[in-house]
Amino acid sequence: MTQAAPADVVARHGELVREVAAHAYRYYVLDDPTVSDAEYDVLYGELRRLEAEWPELTHDASPTTRVGGAPRADLQKHERLVRMFSLDNAYSRDDLESFDERVRRGLPGDQAVVYCVEPKLDGASIEVVYELDHARKHAKLALVTTRGDGKIGEIVAENVRTVRSLPLRLTFDAHAPAPPLGVSRITFRGEVVIYRRDLEAINVAREADGLEPFANARNAAAGSLRMLDPREVAKRPLRLALYQFVEGASLQQTHAQSLAWMASLKLPTHRREVLCEGLEAVWKQISALDIARATYPFETDGAVIKVDDYRAHSILGETTKFPRWAIAYKFAPERARTRVLSVEVQVGRTGALTPVANLDPVPLAGTTVSRASLHNFDQVASLDVRVGDLVEIEKAGEIIPQVVAVVLAQRPPHAAPVPVPTRCPECDTEVVRAAGEVALRCPNRRCPAIVRAALHYYARRFAMDIDHLGPSIIEALVQSGLVADVADLYDLTVEQVAGLPRMAHKSASNVVSQIQGSKSRTFDRLLCALGIPQVGQVAAKQLAEVLPSLSECIALGPDGVATRASEVNGFGPSMVEAVRAYFADDELQRLLGKLAARNVSVPFLADNAVVQGPLSGARFCVTGVLSRSREQVHAAIRAAGGEVHDSIKVDTTYLVAGDKVGATKLEAAKKKGTRVIDEATLEAMMRGEILVETTNAAAPARATKKKKSSDEGGTQGA
């Protein structure tokens, strides 16, 4: 019989659990540690030694249990009780005035409404559920799910347990009272974020390992949440800010009270909410947040305005898309001024020459920017950008830095015009400009820059999905002469890759294994990876439905391939000609032959049965950042009977616009009469709650709502 731990050991264990948790709270939540890292490590080490000696002391609230378990094969789905809505967006004071008017019109009486204004966090949304134990006056962490489609999310509890700012157990007392006895669980919503300083450190490490840096903190946080091995997630500096109390919220009367109660439980919140009576006070606070956001450790792209009174929430209710009691005000893209130090020319996958400005480093939207795109040499001439100029930069879609203006009044006398290149900076081939094109191009397909870019595109997740094949490895492969095209990848041996600079044998083995594994990708993935002009992910899948294998394409020849392509709905004459020209090119024919000889890709097996569903007859284009991957949204549309377009065509019925949508797609939708909808509207259409239009209109039209069934319930939180 195992001897029980002595009373003094049990007491010391309890002290250590509380002390380690308290220090983690001060470090990860308050950002105000009272002990050094070394002192914390001593306490944590003592706790681990006690639990190793007396295993019965370990319980689910111990800080040592945050990371554990083997990697999972996949993420399980969970249907939540209360739908997680998106928020409607406002971009101007007029939009806010319209929102305020709707709120006041929907509430009894005619008085100013009290709003709670807080920063809109730019991370990955999650829902956190605790189960209550009223007898012991505590609640333990029970479930964590991603946002998903709002109703169904993926279970990521093991991953989020690694976030040290989230308590594994909540303790109730006089300062933080427990919910009523009838409540068995309490639910919160929040955002998993990565601090700016931590993202910079992650990207430095990723680049050193030959991996692509994360474009922004949001992508890094979302990708981390969905990793299958919690031990890997624990290496990411994830943090959490809860912003909404959902189930169990009847304990409080207002949103602000809920946030205060959450903070008293030592839950991580942003602690930046401000109560505002009336629209004028709201507008002032939004302006203050816009100024202050540069000082925040996390990314924020706007302000969230919520009616504070929970009773008003139930009166105002929700639409099929979003709650009527809240709105998100989106800040204009941040701009910064800096000096152009030089302009270099990059050569892309298609041979296009892109001028890039090297800048005096400047902080912008959460990162330090030292380079910005100038797009093309016509744009350089239009802006009249010169070396030495003071310029204004912003991030397109808050991701890609670009020069948007020159401060001509402060142009130095020595500012030198940017010369237009006549020869490729990589291979010295004379550049060309095709009729009707803006871009200058290098026509040499063996140009090292074109080969590198083609390899990088080929290996991307949506194409052949070759993990571990990062920029530094690609650079070394091309520079060493081992790889001159994508087919050469399949001839690489572990010994050859291990001979590259800074490449260990195990890493080389992983790279070669991933490359060989990509042979099993379906033919539509290969078509996308080849970078055929005008053929993206969607068009590649459509083309693979009529051309299911590489061997069939080679046997048909260019004209036969073009004939099949012309049968694809949505493939116009220019797309068909682009496909024909690709397969007619002698050099590319040799490349296709090499790939076929190496058995790259397997036939694409399409389900040719016509899917009938709520979206039948409608055609969709998807753009922007959505709650799930573009491929998942495309699959959902097709499963509901809809058709997916790569770009907006004359018969595209709807543009599904997520966050951070570029102006080009919106302008194309307006020009072609394509209706613009958000993700929540698409989901309502797929559920059959909104009737779907199947023809285009000269201007965006409203879809007709179906009558709401009597068993549809409301929700308490966004």
Image (spheres, helix red, strand yellow):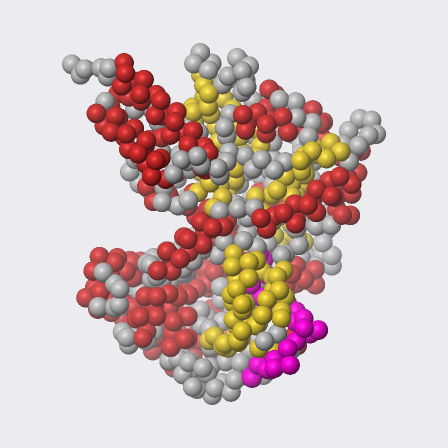
Measured as percent of width and height from the top left, residue 421 is found at: 52, 84
Q: Residue at x 24, y 66 (%)?
A: 497
* Residue 271 in view: yes
The image shows residue 67, relative to residue 61, as above or below, that is below
Depth check: 345 or 41 in front? 41
Depth check: 88 or 328 in front? 328
Measured as percent of width and height from the top left, residue 543 is found at: 46, 64
Quadrant in the rendering for residue 582: bottom left
Quadrant in the rendering for residue 409: bottom right
401 in the magenta segment = yes
* Residue 641 in view: no
* Residue 343 horizontal side relative to residue 663, left or right: left
Depth check: 304 or 26 in front? 26
395 in the magenta segment = no
The image shows residue 625, relative to residue 65, as above or below, that is below
Q: Residue at x 66, y 49 (%)?
A: 290
Quadrant in the rendering for residue 255: top right
* Residue 287 horizontal side relative to residue 350, left or right: right
Furthest residue in direction left, as rendered: 1
Measured as percent of width and height from the top left, residue 174 is found at: 54, 15
Furthest residue in direction right, as rendered: 110
Q: Residue at x 40, y 70 (%)?
A: 454
Magenta-drawn segment: 396-420
Report the number of numbered marks.
Answer: 0
Quarter of the image that includes the C terminus: top right
Quarter of the image that includes the N terminus: top left
